[in-house]
Image (cartoon, rainbow, N blue to C red):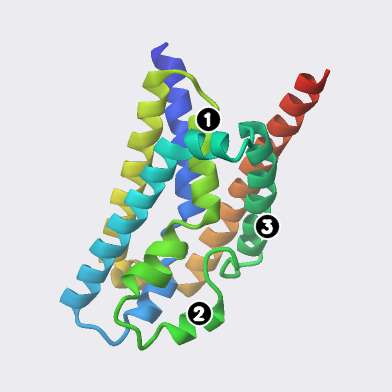
Amino acid sequence: MIVENLGFFIYAFTSIFVIVDPVSGVVTFISLTSGMTCEEKNEVAKKAVTLACVIALFFAMTGSVILNLFNVSVDALRVVGGLLLFTIAFDMMHAKVSRESITEEEISQSQEREDIWIFPIGLPLLTGPGTISTAIVLMGGTDTFGQKILILIAIIITFVLCLYIFLFSRKIHTFIGYNGMLVFTRLMGLLLAAIAVDMAAKGITDIFNLAN
């Protein structure tokens, strides 16, 4: 049981961390906070990560209610979510900013805004449709209370790491370098693509088995 839960936790944490992908978001975060002092930058990071974490936790805990309200099955969301994650992964493998998260035009228009911790950093850079659908699918894919708690813990740990990555964003960028960021983004994209295919395949298989 312990080994099974540990394996499930690793899968849940990996899925959430890869889709949030805070390391790749460092460049965007630095760009949006370039004119701020260190204190202001840290305040933006704390507010944005807190907001993103709350949104992810909210949809994780209420996702089944939302699906039932619209009469949508978890397997249907698995298929759609898998396709969405694959499009994000495709952009990442080409070292591009995912259009699901934020566009270059949105980055440019956000430079002068005071509430960038809400949009575009908190939503959708950190918690976009991909993160939300992944959280709902993970929670809907298990009936075990213990595993549901593990998913919530995985979400919280992901955003705690995200906070520290943003707080030390300039040092990380200096240490890894721009090329290092591109390599990391491509590797995360490859891993995300595998998760996306697995998610979509499971959804299709379950739908097919249910129909028969």
What is the residue that sits farthest to the left in this orientation?
39
Residue 208 falls in which quadrant of the image? top right
Q: Mark 1: few, some, or many residues within 10 Å (few <14, many ≥20)? A: many
Residues under numbered marks 2 and 3 in contact, where contact means CB atoms less than 8 Å apart:
no
What is the residue that sits farthest to the front in this orientation?
69
Residues under numbered marks 1 and 3 in contact, where contact means CB atoms less than 8 Å apart:
no
Three-letter amino acid code of the residue under disc 3: Thr
Which residue occupies 24% across, 62% down? 46
Secondary structure at badge 2 equals helix
Q: Earlier in the sequence, mark 2 or mark 3?
A: 3
Q: Is residue 87 above or below residue 30?
A: above
Residue carrying label 2? 106
Q: Position of residue 36 (x, y in %)?
A: 24, 83
Q: Is residue 180 left or right of residue 41?
A: right
Which residue occupies 29% across, 70% down? 171
Secondary structure at badge 3 equals helix
Q: Is residue 181 above or below residue 11?
A: below
Three-letter amino acid code of the residue under disc 1: Gly
Residue carrying label 3? 87
